[in-house]
Amino acid sequence: MTTPRPPRPTAVRQAAWYVAAWSPFVPLFALLIALSEPRLGAIDAIDAGVRSIAWAAFLGLGAVVVARRVPWPGAVTARVATIHLLAMCAYSAGWLAGILAPIVAADPVNGLAQMRTVIGWQLLQGATTYAVLAIVLYVRRGIVVAREREARLAAAEALRTRAELEALRGRLDPHFLFNTLHSVRALVARDPARAQEAIDRLAALLRTTLDGKRADDDTVTVREELAFVDDYLALEAMRLGDRLRVVREVDAGALDAELPAFTIQPLVENAIVHAIAPRAAGGTLQLRVAGGDAHVTVTVADDGPGADAARVATATGVGLDAVRRRLVASGGARRLELETAPGAGFVARVVLPEPA
């Protein structure tokens, strides 16, 4: 499962955006020219504005090349400053020459005298325009790079959460399957009906696991997840007998809330493996699903020996940490809350948004 990179803009699209960015300056320059030269008619002023901006935009392609060839290092360095200072001077001089050439060609004496009064202003305008253009190009490039980085991170996160899901699925096979098969084998002669029921539940459990591996969408409802957990608990109850006591409190109105697949089962397994199975007297597993306050809460609690909360919070093995990461990656303000202390049992609480 991979996340595709965002498509890069085509050359035609980039050119269109470049032309569109310069277009608003045409009427502005036409107005400035008309105000500075009242003798010019509106058509001549617009024509002069178009020629001036067209030349500025053409020279601006050089700024685009410089910005691409000289990536922003994160701070102003002597090399970057020198390159852009030279490019700024070339841009200003080129823009001035482009404006001056047709005027002087049409009237060498008066045209040159007329341009002497605005040469300084034109050079300053060219330098300012180049600086703004370079800044915009670097900012735009920074946005593109940031988006590509986010896409790569999202792809990596998707792959990692998929790997964690596969790891959670894989945990179901080795340490659980053999115990179940041994229990079924013992029941075959003594209680064939219960053995048949156990085989049916095991088949349903494995079918869910295999179907999930083929699916592209890891999201299920609480109802579907609980059905999987019920099969798991039934098989564990067959093995542990009266040592496993389950208390269920389920709000039927909260069963349509969505969560990543294999979220509740690892929490139930954690309680059985660490709190109930090791004790001769067994223990009680509490499974609650409640809605309200714009949230659905799924709670898995046991009355076992508990654990040190600080160590649990920093644990990074497959299990609780994988469940926590997958909930966060799924979005929607989903999260895993843990409460435990030595001798005080263990509570895992999955908080989900209410179903729409």
Image (tube, rainbow, N blue to C red):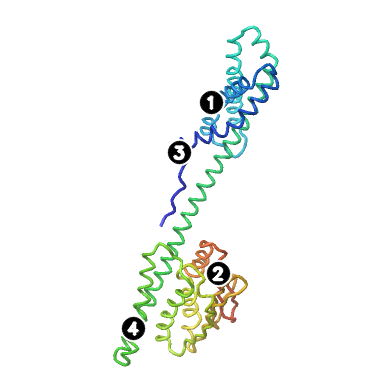
| Rendering coords of residue 76 (x, y %) | 62, 35
Q: Could you tell which of marks 1 and 3 lies nearer the N-terminus?
A: 3
Q: Which residue is mark 4?
A: 182
Label 2 and label 4: CA atoms lie apart by: 37 Å
| Rendering coords of residue 222 (x, y %) | 49, 73
Circle 3: residue type: Thr
In the image, which disc is placed on residue 10?
3
Label 3 and label 2: CA atoms lie apart by: 41 Å
Q: Could you tell which of marks 3 and 2 lies nearer the N-terminus?
A: 3
Q: Which residue is mark 1?
A: 58
Circle 2: residue type: Leu
User: Are the residues tagged 2 and 4 within 8 Å (C-beta)?
Assistant: no
Label 1 and label 3: CA atoms lie apart by: 19 Å
Q: Quadrant of residue 74?
A: top right
In the image, which disc is placed on residue 352?
2
Q: Could you tell which of marks 3 and 4 lies nearer the N-terminus?
A: 3
Secondary structure under the numbered disc 2 in the rendered image: strand
Question: Is residue 273 positioned above or below 125 on the image?
Answer: below
User: Are the residues tagged 2 and 1 within 8 Å (C-beta)?
Assistant: no
Secondary structure under the numbered disc 4 in the rendered image: helix
Mark toward the viewer: 4 or 1: 1
Question: Is residue 213 positioned above or below 298 on the image?
Answer: above
Circle 4: residue type: His
Mark toward the viewer: 2 or 1: 1
State the residue at coordinates (42%, 83%). 236
Mark toward the viewer: 3 or 2: 3
Q: Could you tell which of marks 4 and 1 lies nearer the N-terminus?
A: 1
Label 3 and label 4: CA atoms lie apart by: 63 Å
Mark toward the viewer: 2 or 4: 2
